[in-house]
Amino acid sequence: MGEKSEVNGAGGARPVRVLMTAPSLDMLGGQSRQSAMLRERLREESSVEVTFLPVNPRLPGPLGRLQEVKYVRTVLTTLLYWAKLLLAAPRCDVLHVYSASYYSYLLSAAPALLVGKLYGKKTILNYHSGEAEDHLRNWRTALPTMRLADAFAVPSGYLVDVFARFGLRARAIHNIIELDHFRFRERAPLRPVFLTSRLLEPLYNVGCVLRAFALIQQRYPEASLKVAADGWQRPELEELARTLGLRNTEFVGAVPFERMPDVYDAADVYLTATNLDNMPGSIVECLACGLPVVTTDAGGIPYIVTHEETCLMVGLNDHEAMAAAALRLLEDPELVRAIARNGREHCRRFSWSLVQGEWLRLYHEVARARVGSEPSRRALSAE
C-alpha cells in the first residue's frame, strides 16, 4: 500500500481499513442482511473504516441487461467482481470475506482470499453455511484456499467445531439481531395460527412441515399455515399441500426483511423442519417476538436454543413428532409462557452491544498480525 503510518485506531494512528466483500441487498438472504447491518453500525466506530464491495456488482446502464441472461450473468458478474477486487484490495489493511459454501464460495470468497494473498493483505473468512462439513470434506478446492485466510469467523459454536475437525481454528462471533425491530408479545391463549419461512428447497424440508400440519388440522380443523418463502420447490410443495387436503394454507412467496416483523406478529407458532443448518436467524427473530418455535435438531440449532427452555425440538424428518410438539404448545399455556419469556431474554446475547467488541478486536488483531489467540466460543455456546 505504500503507507507507513501505524494501524491502530487509537492515539492518533489511522483506523484499520477494511474491505468487506458480501452479497448486496439485491440478493435477499442472511449474508446480505448481516453484512449490511454490520457496515451500518461500524460507521459509528472511529477505529475502523469499511469499504463495501458487493460480490454481485451490476454493470452500468444498458449493459446491465446482459446480466439477466443465464450463464452470461455468471461470466460477466465474475469478471466485474475480479476487476473491482483487484482495484480495491491494495487500499485496505484487512479483507473481511463473507462466504457460503460450494459454488458460492468458489465464485466469491476464494477470489478474495487469492487477491488478498497476492497483495499481502490480511484476510478474515466469515463463513456462514451449515453445509460446511460436506463442503470441506468433498470439494478439493475448499481447504487449500481457506488456508490462505489469516482468521476465521463463524456465527456459531457448531461451525467452530466443524472447522476444528479440519484443522482450522475459528472463533464464534454471532449474527446481529435488531431486537428493536421485533415487537414482543405473549400469546395467550395460543391460536392454531402457524408460520414457516424457510427457503422452498429440499435442504429445508418444508414438506415435513406440511405433513405435520395435516396432522394438526385433524385436531384443529380451523388451523392455518402461512408459507412465507419461495424457492424452486414451490410448485411441488403446493401440489403436496393439495394432495394432503390442507385447508387455510397460503404460499405468499418471499417476504422482504422489513415486513417480516409483521408476519411474525400475526402468527402464534413457528415451524421449521430443516435437515441441516448453522444459525438460522429466523429462529432468533421468533424468540425476539415471543413466537414459540418447533424446530428440528439439525446442525447448529442445538447450539442456539434449548429444548423445553427456549423452543421445542424434534428429530429430523419426523412430521409426527413435529405435530405432537405443536399440539403440546396449543394445550400447555404455562409452557408457552415460559418459552416466550426465556427466549426473549436469551436473544439479547445477539444484540450489537455484545457483538461490537468481538468484531473490533478481531479486526485489530488481524491488522497487527496477532491472530494466534484461542477461538472465542462463548458467543453461541449452549448454556
Image (cartoon, helix red, strand yellow):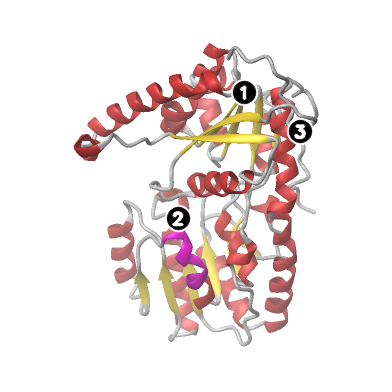
The N terminus: image quadrant: top right
Which span of residues is magenta-colored? 256-263
Q: Main secondary structure of the magenta part?
A: helix
Q: CA distance from mark 3 to mark 2?
A: 33 Å
Secondary structure of the residue carrying tag 2 is loop
**Residue 175 location (% of width, % of height):** 63, 48
Residue tagged 3:
375
Nearest to viewer (mark 2 / mark 1) = 1
Depth order, front residue of 236/63:
63
Depth order, front residue of 6/124:
6
The amino acid on which the numbered mark 3 sits, given as a three-letter code, is Pro
Residue tagged 2:
205
**Residue 296 at least partly seen:** yes
User: From the viewer's perspective, is 186 left or right of 373?
Assistant: left
The numbered disc on residue 71 is none
The amino acid on which the numbered mark 1 sits, given as a three-letter code, is Asp
Residue tagged 1:
93
Secondary structure of the residue carrying tag 1 is loop
Question: Residue 260 lies in magenta, yes or no?
Answer: yes
Secondary structure of the residue carrying tag 3 is loop
Crowd band around label 1 with a 10 angstrom C-alpha radius: few (<14), some (14–19), many (20+) = many
Nearest to viewer (mark 3 / mark 2) = 3
| Residue at x-position 50% and y-position 18% | 115
**Residue 50 location (% of width, % of height):** 58, 35
| Residue at x-position 42% and y-position 54% | 199
Return the disc, 1 or 3, that comes first in the chain's sequence: 1
